[in-house]
Amino acid sequence: MTTIGLNSQAIAAIIIVFTALTLTVNVPIGILADRWSRKAVLMLASCFMITSCVVAGSSHGFGTYLIAACFAGLFYACYQGVYDSLTYDLLIEEMGNAKAYDHFRGKVQLYDGIALTIVALGSALIAHYLHFRAAYFLTIPFSLSALIALCYFKEPKVHKKEVNELVSMHIRSTFQAVFRKGEILWVVITLVFISIAIKLLLDFDQLWFVAIGLPVVLYGPFDAILLSSFTSGGFLNTKFTQGGLLIMSGCIALLSCFCLFLHQSILIIGAQTTIVTVMVLYSIVFEGYLHDNLASKIRVSAASVVSTIGGLLFLPVAYVFGRVSHQYNIFHATWVVIVIVFMTFVAGFKVIAQKSTGRRNINSTEKGH
């Protein structure tokens, strides 16, 4: 953006428009996916990304780059909440239940994380040896590949069983499901805190390195290590999701937060990676808990509502984080991360405890019979 003449104010304006557009269209696109076709929405996502890359790669000023950012926002809105819903419904259609959701969703996240890590390293080489614009144009063939793969994908039809209700009823059912008292409300709260924690560390991770004077040449490799959290989180999710191990991993993430106060780069990146890894693990598990309580016809819609709530609440949290780090330093702002991770752990512990109690009651009933 700076190479095409954009100043800090223009960059901030683009980020604001991108964020506002994504949050605004997130829920309507989720409803569209449930009522129309999740496969088609994902195909639209690829088309939006291709358009964004063409416009951004060709842009020479604020107006064209803003258009590219808007198409990128539409891509993210189409992408969010769809893959986990597809995975859940595919398992129901193919296996008759979604008991293996954590395992297969973990695999999807594992491969996604591997790709993120490779690209984090590769993009630096592309920018150095080619040009920043090349990164946009080289994204196009990958988006085209996704589009072609989706053409051969057989979409599950579980959500199509009840598609005749009015849109207003669909919206009402979605919000009633998300804000229903009991376990699902705590699942939603946990997912919101998870999304805020992940975004805080991914968006502000380099502030710790700036504070300790880390050489810029190490930012790329350290970002790759942080993005590998999505790989390790997905891998761990294929191995265990028991309540006791989830609680233990939550304690490890909380303790890791205190390593962010230290002025050692290895300890800081290790702490960031550990926290995000646990949050990714939690996100997959609690996405499964969310879908366990949802009808298929509102699955993407509800996930979009949760994602939008997380995005909206992230804005004031990010403002507080930025304000504290500016007035004092990043190490004072670390307390914001600790509070968010602690709240995630508390809300998640309540859900895990409720599920453990439910399982004990079921087992007792079965023994009685």
Image (cartoon, rainbow, N blue to C red):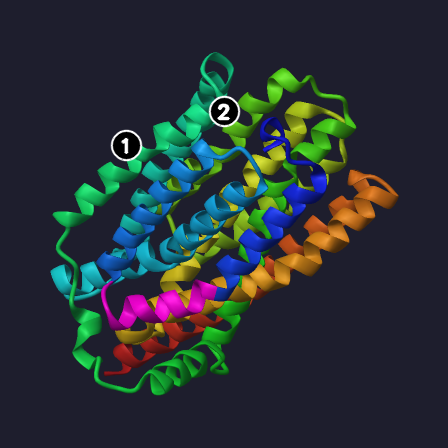
Give residue 141's mark.
Answer: 1
Residue drawn at point x = 44 percent, y = 19 percent: 126
Question: Within the image, what quadrant is residue 207 found in?
Answer: top right
Side of 208 relative to 93 (left or right): right
Residue 351 in sight in this render: no
| Mark 2 vs 1, N-terminal side | 2
Secondary structure of the residue carrying numbered label 1? helix
Q: Nearer the viewer, residue 362 or 352?
A: 352
Q: As displayed, is residue 259 above or below residue 244?
A: above
Residue 71 in sight in this render: yes
Side of 108 relative to 22 (left or right): left
Q: As displayed, is residue 51 above or below residue 298?
A: above
Where is residue 323 drawn, in percent x and y?
80, 50
- Which residue matches tag 2? 132
Q: Which residue occupies the extreme top position in the image?
A: 129
Give residue 303's mark.
Answer: none
The stretch in magenta equals 25-37
The answer for how far apart the CA atoms under marks 2 and 1 are is: 17 Å
Where is residue 192 drawn, in percent x and y?
54, 62
Crowd around label 1: few <14 · some 14–19 · many ≥20 (10 Å) = few
The kind of residue tagged 1 is: Pro
The kind of residue tagged 2 is: Phe
Where is residue 263 drawn, in percent x and y?
77, 27
Where is residue 178 drawn, in percent x and y?
45, 76
Magenta span contains residue 64: no
Residue drawn at point x = 76 percent, y = 22 percent: 213
